[in-house]
Amino acid sequence: MTSSPSHSLMAIPGLVFILAGLTALAPLATDAYLPAVPTMADALGRSVHDVELSISLFLAGFSLGQLFGGPFSDHFGRRIAIFTGLALFSLGSLAIIFTPNIEWLWAFRVVQALGGGLTVVNTPAIVRDISSGNESARTLSRMAMILMLAPLLAPVLGSLILQTLGWPMIFGLLFIYSLLLAVTIHRVLPETRRLQTDRPNALRRYWMVLRHRHALGYLVSACFGYGSLFAFITGSPSVYMGYFSLSETLYPFAFGANVLALLAFNKLNIRLLGRHQPRNLLLAGQLVQVVTGMILIVYVVTSSTVQLPLFILLVMLFFGCHGLVSANAMAGITEFFPTNSATATALMGACGFAFGAFTGSLVGLFADGTPLPMAAMMALCALLAPALRLLLQRGPVPNAEPPRQAGSASSTSA
């Protein structure tokens, strides 16, 4: 399929839903099997923390997939990168259904993650191909609102499949989902990559992003945002089903409450973008997370008995503020790189997921049966994110890319 320079967001039917569906690969692959973690541990004869390690391995593989996928997409085109990634993701999902032990589960999760990373990195790049500035941030927020269905429904679907068909078929659902995405994209999604007269190699593309201090500020924001997010995702099964003794049936609802908060804040972000710049909304979200994180950790440390309702409310507020952080940080960094948006997105996503794998591993390493390790990591990430970003973004904003040639879409054939 050959694209035309005249393609716009509204001219492609259902584009926002398709891109949200692609981005949903990550939350589906991490959240759908969270209710099954204890059952998988029993079935594979290993501890719960060994199965939780597969979450961190997935995040690490997802990061590597994005690092490779960003320059690959900018060089060869969005469609070929998406199809290659979906092929790897579907093969990894299929293999996990038949995994005989925990070691093979870890290996297949990495394969699945590499494909997911290569695929997902294209979605913000496509948004940047066809929009910019506040419009780009609004589009990313609209995608995020649709995307919220994934982490909201994934644990519920995972719990239902666990109780009816067994945990391997949770990965069967991921296999079917990736195939449906591939068929849909093949039929309706055109190539949007912009023409480039200068086509630098991957190292030069990454260096272009890394040497830009203001872009690094947004990168740091995303890293610590992912860090706090996946500290919660990794620790939540032990905290909610262990410390608070929630059942596998009730856990998805406690988890889903955070997704509803995130949905509300994304809607708020869309409305506020009509009057405020993305960078100001990003700062507002980060400051609320700092305050909430401090309250959360003080409550956990000083309370003799942590009450579940108050704990859930504090986590909801913290989690929800990602609706002000993620889309605005992504729009901020891609604004600097119109012809290398996938590379910028890849670096942000890869570093973010790698940092999320690191913080998630630390939460598991220091797990003591209480919410303290999870709460402490969330609060630390929230505190460092705005401090380092504001430090990096002092002074005037330099140019990131040389002026590009006329023409917007490539003639790459799928």
Image (tube, grey):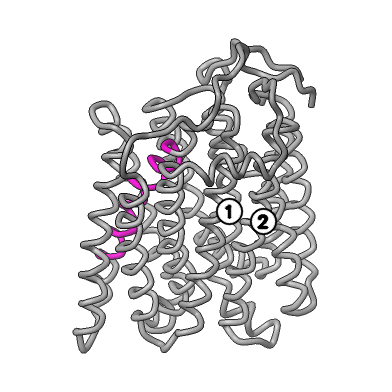
Q: Quadrant of the C terminus?
A: top right
Q: Which range is magenta?
A: 313-332
* Disc marking residue 64: 2
At a point 60% along the width and 50% down the height, the residue shown is 25
Give how far across and how far down residue 403 sits, in percent.
54, 20
* Disc marking residue 318: none
Q: Quadrant location of residue 23?
A: top right
Left or right relative to 271: residue 4: right
Residue labelled with disc 1 = 350
128 over 344 or under it: above or below? above
Give how far across and how far down residue 45 sits, in percent.
69, 87
Residue 305 visible to an observer of this rendering: yes
Q: CA distance from mark 1 to mark 2?
A: 6 Å
Q: Is residue 410 magenta?
A: no
Residue 14 visible to an observer of this rendering: no
Q: Quadrant of the N terminus?
A: top right
